[in-house]
Image (cartoon, grey):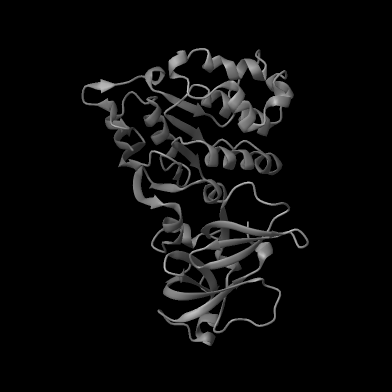
Amino acid sequence: MIDFDFTLTRPDFRLAVAGQIPATGVTALFGRSGCGKTTLLRCLAGLEPAAQGHLRVNGVSWLDANKHLPPHQRPIGYVFQEGALFPHLTVAGNLHYGYKRIPPPARQLHPEDVITLLGLAPLLKRHPHALSGGQRQRVAIGRALLTSPQLLLMDEPLAALDAISKNDILPWLEKLHQTLDLPVVYVSHAIEEVARLADHMLLLERGKLIAAGPLATLLSRTDLPLAHADNAVSVIEGDAGSWDPHYHLLQVAFAGGTLLIPSQQPPQQSRIRIRVAARDVTINLAAAAHDSALNHLPARITGFSDDPHPAHQLVSLLLGDSTPLLARITRKSRDQLGLTEGMAIYVQFKAVALS
C-alpha cells in the first residue's frame, strides 16, 4: 500500500491531498487541467523538494518530518509525455541504460522479458529518430521497467500521440497491466484511456482530492462530474467465454449476465473489460423480442440525476447485485415510460457500441 499526505504551496496554487494507492494495479490521477495531477505525481517521485507531509511505500518511509529521499534514491520508474529517450543511443542502448545501473541482486525484470512484453525485438537497432511516437513510448516504458521500480509513474504518456499512435500503444499498456504485479500511477485527462486501463481512481479538483476508490464505482457516481460529462461511461468486467468464428463475437460473462462483444480473434486473456457509453444505453419496460441490439439485460433503477443538458436525464442502474451502469435518456422518455426508482426494467445496447 502507498500512503501519502502532501502539502505544497505556490504563489498561484496549493496542493493539499492525502490518500492511499493500492500496491498493485493501475491507479489513475484524473481531473481537469491545472487540478494538480502532475504536481501530485512529482511529489511521489520526489521532484518537489518543498512538499511537506509523508509518503510510505509498502511500509517504508520515503518522506516524513525527518526524511526526504531524493528522486535518485526512490525505486521508481518515470515515463514522460515525450518519452525523453537518449537520441544518441539505439533502442537496445536506451533499454540497457537503466538496467546496468541496478545492482544484479535488485534486478526484477531483465531486457529479454521487457523486449518480449512490449514487442520491441524488431526495433532494437534503431535510433529514436527512426521510431514512431507510439514506438518511442513503448521504449520509454521498457527503459523505466528495467530499473526494477517499486512504483511506475506515467505522466500523460499518450498526450503527445495522434489517434492512430494511441490505438497502437494502448494494447501494449493493457498487456503491461495484465502481466506485471506492479503499482502504476497514471496521469491522464482522457476518460477513455482511464476507463480502458485503470483499476482505481483519484479524482482531483483545484489541488484537492474530492473522491477516491474503484474505477467502476467512481464512474457511476452521479454526485461526481464524471457521470455528467458528454462522454460518461460505465465499466463492466467479466470472464471471456466462447468465441464465434463466423460472426466474430465473444461471450463475456459477468455478475449481471452475459454480453456479446465484437472480437476479431479469440481473446488472449481470460478477464475482459467492457466500456459502455451512457448515451448508448436504451431502457425498455420489457425484454425486446426482435431488434438489432444483441445485448438485453434485466436491471433495476437506483436513482435519477439532472444532466447539464435540460433535455437529458441521467439514470443510475444496477445489473445483478453489484454492477453499476449509467444511462443517458431524455426526460420525455422517462415520463413516457413512467420510470421510477426501484423499478425493474431491461437495458439494451448494440454490440458494435461496446469497446
Question: Residue 119, relative to residue 353: is it above or below?
Answer: above
Left or right: 280 as drawn, with respect to 256: right
Q: Which one is nearer the viewer's eye here, 34 or 220? A: 220
Residue reaching furthest to the left: 65
Question: Residue 124, relative to residue 231: is it above or below?
Answer: above
Identified at 72% across, 51% down, the residue is 265
Q: Which one is nearer the viewer's eye here, 225 or 66? A: 66
Question: Residue 267, relative to residue 25: is it above or below?
Answer: below
Question: Residue 269, relative to residue 54: is it above or below?
Answer: below
Q: The C terminus lies in which quarter of the figure? A: bottom right
Residue reaching furthest to the right: 246
Identified at 62% across, 38% down, the residue is 172
Identified at 46% across, 48% down, the residue is 199
| Count of numbered tags | 0
Left or right: 8 as drawn, with respect to 322: left
Identified at 32% across, 20% down, the residue is 69
Q: Based on the displayed image, in which of its 4 quarters is residue 284 positioned?
A: bottom right
> Residue 61 in the image: x percent, y percent?
28, 27
**Is residue 352 visible to the viewer in this orientation of the structure?**
yes
Q: Which one is nearer the viewer's eye here, 124 or 270? A: 270
Q: Which one is nearer the viewer's eye here, 105 or 115? A: 105
> Residue 251 in the image: x percent, y percent?
63, 62
> Residue 272 in the image: x percent, y percent?
57, 53
Q: The N terminus lies in which quarter of the figure? A: top left
**Is residue 308 visible to the viewer in this orientation of the structure?**
no
